[in-house]
Image: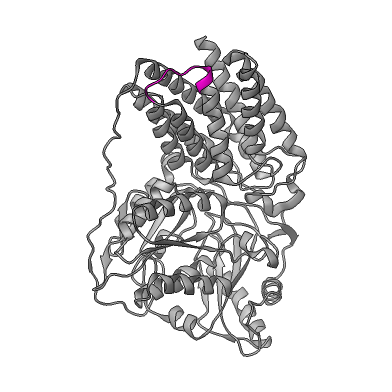
Amino acid sequence: MTRLFNDPDDFAADSAAGFAAASGRWVRQVTGGVVRSTRGPEPTVAVVIGGGSGHYPAFAGLVGPGLAHGAAMGNLFASPSAHQVHSVATAAHEGRGVLLSYGNYAGDVLHFTQAQERMREAGIDCRTVTVTDDIYSAPADEREKRRGIAGDLVVFKIAGAAAEAGYDLDGVERVAILANERTRSLGVAFTGCTLPGADEPLFTVPEGRMAVGLGIHGEPGIDEVDVPSADGLAELFVSSLLAEIPEGADVAGARVVPILNGLGNVKYEELYVVYGAVHRLLGEAGAVVVSPEVGEFCTSFDMAGVSLTLLWLDDELEDLWHAPCDTPAYRRGAVDGRVAAEIAGEDLHEDEFAVGDASDESRAAAVTIGRALDAMAGMLDEQADELGRIDRVAGDGDHGIGMQRGSRAAATAAADAVQRSAGSRTTLQHAGDAWADKGGGTSGAIWGEMLVALGAALGDDAAVDAEAVGAGVARMKDAVMSFGKAKPGDKTMIDAIVPFADRLHERLGAGAGLIEAWRDAADAATAAAEATAQLTAKLGRARSHGDKSIGTPDPGAVSFALIAHTVLRILEEDD
């Protein structure tokens, strides 16, 4: 459990501030994360990494000469928002383009892709390489669906070394892709992890048992076995990873870098006992062990777990792997010629958003929107534990916390906008941005996108009547389906949003009033959310667990249905 914190909601921010204060030799804090505090004599491609907090030294601890140029830092186990990623990438950019790299998780993909698009719109060449090293998370013929775990270090280090060596963006992207293709990992856990202020871990493992194929966000393992001896664990790791050798590689005579990674609550001495057997088994298989690493490189808060990563070298990768680097958590050789950097990115204390002209009708509607968002936040506070329980069945258990944080931030932003006489569009725009920033993850990205889409439909200068609301909800549905790429039947929030929007459109088209139509639509969303219990998850973190989620409804669909009924109550009060 986590013992030292102030307000649990502020834990990630407090930790980031303390990290930056302690690490000024390497980093400087900017909006959304950290960037290097020094730069070399010549500009380089900028390698920007990131993800949720709770994985130190990933991601901020890997920023410095020879490795990453910046790290976007989300909340605990929640992806940074597009705004945060864009801020860090802008600050890190040195004029030669930006490579974004991160673990292949749905929320990270959504947010980083949005940030990449914004960079490109600004005329900056920006590319992405996702890390997909976890062999248990998808079959070999679906490697693009695999998630990233401790193999993050490999891809980040290779890309950072290439940038330091003067490679152009094409070259940095090429070797990052190659490093990812030649990296494989497998992880196990003996206990789950517990977030600050939580009463129980995100998942549990029975005494004497070990979860195999876990994720790094508190996702439970895909399989479960008896806890083996240290030699037995090494045998499981090595045999599993050697069963899937990268294309073009061969065990006999191959040069392999093993990285034995502690996930937060396993003693270094235990890691060394396991590594001794790993080293022996690799040698017996004919591999040549090169520069092994044993320690904590990508943790999962206080989880008791271990992972093994193998990097299969070629000559170029070996040179880049051994190149010097100097970061708060990972150092090799000596890096000279650094000078203090001027930061061009967004300042930590940004100006307040602008409030433009708005009609009286739109301002009045914004007051109702603010009340609805406040009621949503109150409801999600009450439901956070239950939503987390549902999510723990086959996910990482943080849906309730993420919705709680995001809705609180959205309600606060909306209240500020209303107090400053903003119209509906402006109020929803800033509520959506705040939800994405603080909620993080897939749900944060989607709810941010939905609120912004609704605001764009309502505008700041028109009356908000039933027709406008119906058009706005349709636009929300279209935006989230385009943004998240999910479709009905995938066991996601979409399974509740689509019937809600369709029923609302149908009832309004038949002449029903807004409250009557909304009530029918909310009931349709609830029924659809309950029906997801019979579906198999096809997207998101629950996808890796196949049929394990059958019998439990999708937490995103459930939370949407609850929100629909909460908004109904506000509409009835204002009638």
Whole-percent x and y of residue 317? Answer: 49, 80
Q: Is residue 205 visible?
A: no
Relative horizontal placement of residue 124, taking residue 158 as reference (left or right): left
Whole-percent x and y of residue 433? Answer: 42, 38
Relative horizontal placement of residue 284, taking residue 132 as reference (left or right): right
Residue at 39%, 15% (x, y): give it: 361
Q: Main secondary structure of the magenta part?
A: loop
Residue with the most extreme top position: 575
Q: Is residue 319 visible?
A: yes
Q: Nearer the viewer, residue 194 or 116?
A: 116
Q: Nearer the viewer, residue 561 or 401?
A: 561
Whole-percent x and y of residue 372? Answer: 49, 22
Q: Is residue 258 above or below residue 520?
A: below
Q: Quadrant of residue 67?
A: bottom left
Q: Is residue 412 above or below residue 103?
A: above
Q: Is residue 446 above or below residue 368?
A: below
Q: Quadrant of residue 554?
A: top right
Whole-percent x and y of residue 510? Answer: 65, 16
Residue at 43%, 55% (x, y): give it: 116
**Residue 461 belongs to the span the image colors magenta:** yes
Q: Nearer the viewer, residue 453 or 175?
A: 453
Q: How many marks?
A: 0
Q: Is residue 566 above or below residue 293?
A: above
Residue at 60%, 43% (x, y): give it: 200
Residue with the most extreme bottom position: 253
Render colour scheme: one colour
**Residue 358 belongs to the span the image colors magenta:** no
Residue range of the region highlighted in magenta in the rendering: 460-468
